[in-house]
Structure formats: C-alpha cells, structure tokens
Amino acid sequence: MGEKKVSLPAKLINGGVAGLVGVTCVFPIDLAKTRLQNQQGIQVYKGMFDCLAKTVRSEGYFGCYRGAAVNLTLVTPEKAIKLAANDVFRQKLSKDGHLPLWGEVLAGCGAGTCQVVVTTPMEMLKIQLQDAGRLAAQRPVSAAAQAAAPGPAPSLVAPPPQAQPAPPQRPSATSITAQLLKTRGLAGLYRGAGATLMRDVPFSMIYFPLFANLNALGRDSAGSQAETQARAPFWQSFAAGCSAGSVAAVAVTPLDVIKTRLQTLQKGEGEDTYRGIVDCTRRILEREGPSAFLKGATCRALVIAPLFGIAQVVYFLGVGETALGFFG
C-alpha cells in the first residue's frame, strides 16, 4: 500500500470488497457499540453481550443487522476512497521509494479527510437505524420506573378502559433520508461532519503508519517500502491490520462518543441534546464523568480490528488487480 504505481480502479475495487466482507462479519458488534454509547440516563444494557442478547430476544437475530443495508451500500465507496487515497498520497509524498514518518502521517491525514464525504451520511443514517431498538427497549423500563414511583392513593372507581397505543414504527433509511432532506436540506445528512472529521483524521494518522511499520517487521528493508510490504505473508497483513486498527480505534473512542451523540436525532427520556462539539464534551464530562468518553471502547476495538485485518488481507491479495486482469 505504498509507493508503487497505483492502479486506481483496482484499488477502489479492493477497498470496496474489503469493506463489504469486513462489515458483514462485525456489524452486530458495531450495533452494540452505538447503543452503549448513546445510553445516558436509563441503562437498558449492562454491556456488549447483554446488549446483543436483549437485541436478539426483542428484535430477532436480524435485529443485530439493523442499519446494515446502509452500511453495506456506502461502505464500498467509503473504504475504497480511504484505502486508495492513502495509496495515492503515499506515492506522491515518497522520494526514491521511501517515505518518512511525517509523510506516512500526512498521507493518513489526507485519506481520513477524503473519506468524510461518504462516511458522514453513512454514519448519520446507520446510527438512527441502530439506535431505534434501544429507544424502543427504553420505553418499558421508563414506564416501570414511573409505575413504581410513589403517587396519590388509588381511586376506588375503575378508570375507563383505554386503547393500547400502537407500537411506534421503526424508521427506514429511505424515510430518514427523505425527512432530513425535506426539513434540513443536504446539510441534514452531513450533521456532525466536523465531529466525523475530528474522529477519522486522527484515526487514519495513527492507523496507516502503524500498519505499514507492523507489516514490514522482520524483513530486509532493501528496496522501497511498498516492495517490503508486498513481501508480507498473509497472516502478517491480517495481524498488522488487526493490531493497528484496535490501537487506533481505542485511541479515538472519546471522539467517536461525541460524534455518535451529536448525530443521534431521537433522544430517550431525560437524555441531553447538544449544540455542538464543545457543548457535548462539557455536558458529558459534567453529567456522566470522564469514563463516559470510553463507552463502547471494547466494542470499537472488536469491530475495527477484524474489519481492517480483513480489509488489508483483501487489499494485499490484489482482488481488484485479478478482477481487472480477468475481465480485461
């Protein structure tokens, strides 16, 4: 992934295939991450496994994949842009086949910036779909808490029967998109773009240099960095992707919590709404304490590690080059 001649169509195919395979494998954990990060008052879930178990019980197995269609649709261009842009920037910044550390960090910064154009609307829609189940599960808990609260003495006269309210319909990606475009225009889909940029740029600045160096460990450094990485065995690319991904994911978890809170449109009872990044940071710190910024950190590591491990294996296997060669 470096300074060799970049075949952009092949890299786009590699990034797209990598994203599809990775997301399919780890999406349920990502759903748990979103729901845990959005918990403020009423704690519906005690942790990742509790969240997944309750989701399966109340929504069925496929409830764990709520929002996956949006992710699978948009992750192809998102991962394609991210991985291909990093390649292009590394090639442009390298000199005589070698890239200094500052160049690796700068290339990662460029890749993280480029992907935001797709990442922001993808995350915006995905979060609403993922969090709908948490809000639905929170209603019975809230009602039970209110019923248990002390109140006036019960009347001896039976109240008239009331019709049961119809359960709220779960939103769809289409309805959310239409509503956002109608009420807020295109900017509605890019709500939280600043927070997304604030998360994805540092992530890429950590991830790509760390991956490149881990993937080159244990081999002769003669030749360009791209050639050194190309000699990496299958397992090393996977391990390097997992390790670099988990480190970068945990490092930017506080920024991911802020981004998730800002992009969540529907709030539960007693949950805060925020005016921006600074207001969100201040309120979380005051009301929930510093530990709230690490909500979902384990889930993020478990999502990002295999996602990028799989992505780098697919990328380095050259699926795109093989496909173009076959059809070309």
Image (spheres, rainbow, N blue to C red):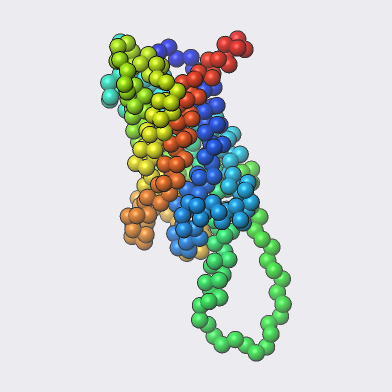
Residue 308 vs residue 132, the one in the foreground: 308
Residue 301 screen position, x and y as percent: 42, 41
Image coords of residue 83 (percent x, y): 45, 25
Determine if residue 279 is in view: no
For the point 67% across and 88% down, the residue is: 157
Q: Note whether residue 90 is visible.
A: yes
Q: Which is more toward the observer, 110 or 27?
A: 27
**Vertical side of 307 occupied by 286: above or below:** below
The image quadrant where one finds the N terminus is: top left
Residue 126 picture quarter: top right
**What residue is drawn where x is 72% and y is 77%?**
161
Q: Position of residue 206 (x, y in %)?
A: 34, 33
Rendered location of residue 104, percent (x, y): 32, 24
* Residue at 47% in and 40% down: 303
Say above or below: 313 vs 246: above
Q: Residue lying farthest bottom?
A: 156
Name the residue: 56% across, 31% down. 20
